[in-house]
Amino acid sequence: MLGMGNMRQWLMNISLVGGWFPAAAFAVVAVLSVTLLVSAAVSKRDGRILATVLPIGVAAVSGMVGYVVAWLLSDVFVVFGVGLGSRVMAWVAAGFAIAGFAIVHIVLSRGMMRVAAAILTVFAILAAAIGIDQSYGEYATIGSLFGEDSYSQADLTGLAKRKDLITVAQWRKQAANGTIRNIPANGTVNKIDIPATKSQFEARKALVYLPPAALADSKRKPALPVVLMLSGQPGSPGRVFQAGGIQTMMDGYAKTHDGLAPIVIAADQLGADSHNTLCVDSKVYGNALTYLTQDVVDWVKTNLPAAQDAKDWAIAGFSQGATCSLQIGVNHPDLFGTMIPTDSEIKPTNGSRQEMIDRFFDGDTTAYENQVPVNAIRNHAPTHQMLIIGAGEKDTTSIRNVKTIAPVAAKAGMRVAAVESSGNAHDWHAVQDVLRYGLAVFGHDTGLDGANPNLSDYPNLKRITI
């Protein structure tokens, strides 16, 4: 029998993106809707036709109202800063329609059918919320709604000594001739505390993925490439791994590469869900930039089996984190050789331009302008960094941003791959598509794989002409 602690853990780990719980919610909605419809149709009470037709009519009108409201908020007033996408608007319409259908039955029905209609109203809202979440891929479990995850804390200080590291090429050679054995089947993900020694930034715990090669029973571990990954805002390091499917993606890569895959660090650039630090040092939220570029980078290079050169480091992110990855990557070519932003903004955004200049840059307009990606790229030209930039096909704003940023990067000398994720919008499904291709490119560039990836091998991605 499950104890209270185990019961809570079981509840928190229930999946919202697949499995029995979403299926059950959708099934309850379907069964109750059909039950109410049939019950009204076969009823011998007066007004049977009205009780059958009116809920359907109200459902149709409610669905249209829901879609129009979502469209206005998304595409006309742009309340959320980005478009919601057609799938999300369809789920909003479905929720409105079923709720309208159920509410009419609450008014017209009696007894158990009225109870069923009340239950349907609740499940209509629940099912629509689950559908919207699945469209975004944002919250993987019930626990993630409350900022909880199942990752264990670890102290990885001193995990590897630099003098003991070998090159990736040496590791591949030894794995091929059988010198290295007992490589674990999978990597690990752990929470870690990265001291904010220089920045004093109040960051939440970071998450780190270590591939099998970093865990093998061998003193001579490979100096692995590193991906610094940033969430959107609101967001957290845990959201990166859960919504981004990082461990599954990296383990899949490692299985065909002798246990080799990048180390992935999801560090906190926000400090709290409600904070948009713009990834700069400021008096508003603290020294987020110094934390990421010094505290995090230095700690990883000192304690993990990590490569030291900028060509072996990538910075990636989603939405606000994508904007940050461009700002930081371009302005710090000494740290990052590759950038993999998905659904980036055209510029850092937290209030109006003047508000940002006054609050975050102490009135220094030039300092703000230097954080705008296209300006930063021009400031550092010529540059030979790699940019894999993408967006969801239905996120028209981000697609437009890609078409603005990518040509500037190419003109500055960067190698640029601009892609769109078919059928997706401003969501984590797009992130996974872009990151999977970015991983292949980065893996080739850092020697993890000898084959140069072809975009045609990624059927959900299409090249954006720049």
Image: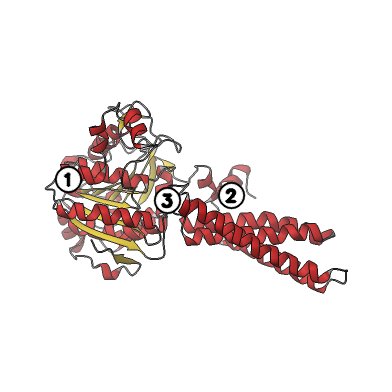
Dot placed on the residue nearer the N-terminal end, 1 or 3: 3
Instruction: List the single residue furthest toward the left.
Output: 382
For the residues marked 3 and 2, what is the alpha-carbon distance in whole angstroms? 32 Å
Nearest to viewer (mark 3 / mark 2): 3
* Mark carried by residue 17: none
For the residues marked 2 and 1, what is the alpha-carbon distance in whole angstroms? 50 Å
Q: Mark 2 points at which residue?
A: 11
Please state if 46 lies on the left or on the right of 178 as rendered. Answer: right
Give the residue at x 65% y 58%: 124
Viewer-side residue, 348 vs 415: 348
Viewer-side residue, 35 vs 307: 35
Percent of width and height locating residue 131:
54, 59
Percent of width and height locating residue 45:
88, 69
Which quarter of the picture shows residue 65?
bottom right
Query: Can residue 153 be seen in the rendering of this structure?
Result: yes
Is 365 rendered above or below residue 185? above
Q: Mark 3 points at which residue?
A: 82
